[in-house]
Amino acid sequence: MSDNNTESVHDVDAVDAVVVGAGVTGLYAVHKLRELGYRVRGFERGADVGGVWYWNRYPGARCDVESADYSYSFDEELQQAWDWSEKYATQPEIMRYLSHVTDRFDLRRSYTFGTSVVSAELDGETLRWTVRTDDGDGGGEVLSARFCVFAVGCLSSTHQPSIPGLDSFAGDTYHTGEWPHEGVDFTGLRVGVIGTGSSGIQSVPLIADQAAQLTVFQRSANYSIPAGNKPLDEEARRELKAGYAERRRLARLSGGGSPFMTHPQRTLEVGERERRKAFEKRWELGGVLYSKTFPDQLTDLAANHAARAFWEEKVRALIDDPAVADLLVPTDHPIGTKRIVTDSDYYETYNREHVRLVSLRENAIERVEGQSVYLADGERFELDALVLATGFDAMTGSLDRIDIRGRGGRLLKDDWSAGPRTYLGLGTDGFPNLFNLAGVGSPSVLANVILCAEQHVDWLTDCLAHLDAHGYVAIEAAERAVEDWVTECRERAAATLMMSADSWYLGANIPGKPRVFMPFVGGFGAYGEIIADVAASGYKGFDLI
Ligand code: N01
């Protein structure tokens, strides 16, 4: 630690584990690590628990995984006690749920909120980590920890577009990922939304309900599927609760961590009627799982075309003006290679008089000046408010903000400059006792992240119990195992269509980021088997120290 910092910090607190983040993963990690008898300190940048749900409070923010699945499975009483009110929960309901879980397991007492971890440095002799926080609510602390557990979320560092003059926009500017907690009233205003990913597509219909005029600036069209959201009545809830055991069993075997299996045959192996029936069923189910109707949809272009054609037919039927529909139908990537959006009335919103879609494809935003947005061809839009739905520096953005130094002072960010290097997504060589949960190198963003969190945390706590039972101080991924896993992840991604879209999975939305497919594409169930085998073999690929 630099000498000039010493006076501003409290005494060094020695703990077993530091957990960074109080989102769905961090909360469960704190719970399980405490169950091991560990002394745990958690740190969270936000003023409360919730992670991504704490920050993303834009109108229409809603989960795209069904509520029953997007909930913890580790405690039967918890899952029987909680009542979801809708098929897809809204952000406020998820916050209430996470707060309930936090209270139920008394997790807040382990956290310091409003405080970010700014650095973690390994002592090569003791293999302990010195962790420092900023001078947020916690006042700037230094801790010594045996284990560092990062649960910082994959979509937590917002991406601000570099548009000349944006900073000096004379109206109000909001990023969907940092939405004001008191909400925003757009009544009677001229509003512009930049970005048509999940955040833009979810917020547009609700902003349109309030705004006098709404202009949506679209650089790339996206595939979206109506959520088919509906309230859950008493009977539906009773059925869900009675079926949890089977629901979870299927989810654990599945590719995406939800209890839905693909059709047993390949897309073109079945006849036209059967194929349409299967697509129709998924369309009715709603949302993101459409990309898993048939098993080959993301590996075979002809299969993908069939899914895409069905989608296009459905979506064009929702849009009155064929010229607007032409703009809304993507032509630059196969369906499902960017996350399919789950919407409520998105396409229908463009049938409203006061809503205009502006394509930036051949006519980009050139600058912002005063209250005006100017396009390259000189067209000007006078606006009172601008909503940036421009996404995140996904998967690595939040880790990159932390100065993490392993053996010999190696900086994690430098080690990952050509793309993230992990073994199983969990650990990396040179960084013993440091774990990154539900992020790069694991199914994470390609699956139901709550079950991913449980899968990783359960693996981790079993592993730490193993270390303690056998008298080991530390565990570290072997360099060779890291290299092999990076290769395996790359090869598996290359065997799919996922490399053909400029997605945030590939870092393609962030200028200068290496184009590497960051999550593990092989499926949630298959990944679970791989990490279970590694544990059963005595942690092959890791050095136990
Ligand atoms: O971000 P995105 P998001 N000028 O990166 C555009 C999860 N999520 O916050 O595609 C103009 O997908 C950009 O255009 P392009 C979910 O996993 C889930 O919407 O780069 N436009 C794109 O249209 C999701 O996938 C839910 O050409 C610019 C948009 O901004 C992930 O989070 C809800 C631009 C960004 O889309 C990210 O979604 C919300 C510029 N300079 C989010 N820069 C649920 O349903 C960027 N864009 C649970």
Image (cartoon, helix red, strand yellow):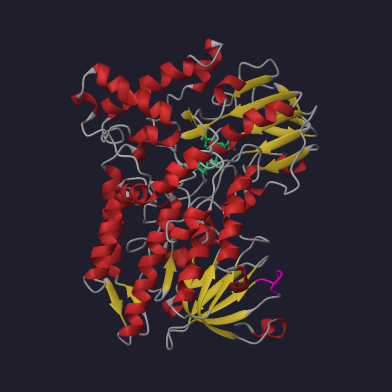
Question: Is residue 521 left or right of 127 when viewed as pictured?
Answer: left
Image x and y of residue 535, in percent: 27, 69
Quadrant containing the N terminus is: bottom right
Residue 523 shows in the view: yes
Q: Against 140, is 367 above or below?
A: above
- Which span of residues is magenta-colored? 134-138
Residue 427 shows in the view: no
Which quadrant of the structure image shows residue 135? bottom right
Q: Against 218, is 173 above or below?
A: below
Which quadrant of the structure image shows residue 361? top right
Along the line of sight, which residue is nearer the eye, 1 or 117?
117
Image x and y of residue 152, in percent: 52, 60
**Residue displayed at 52% across by 45% down:** 511
Image x and y of residue 51, in percent: 58, 56
Q: Look at the magenta stretch and give its main secondary structure.
A: loop
Q: Against 5, is 458 above or below?
A: above
Which quadrant of the structure image shows residue 462? bottom left
Quadrant containing the C terminus is: bottom left
Along the line of sight, which residue is nearer the eye, 344 or 242?
242
Tell me, yes or no, whether the highlighted magenta stretch contains residue 281: no
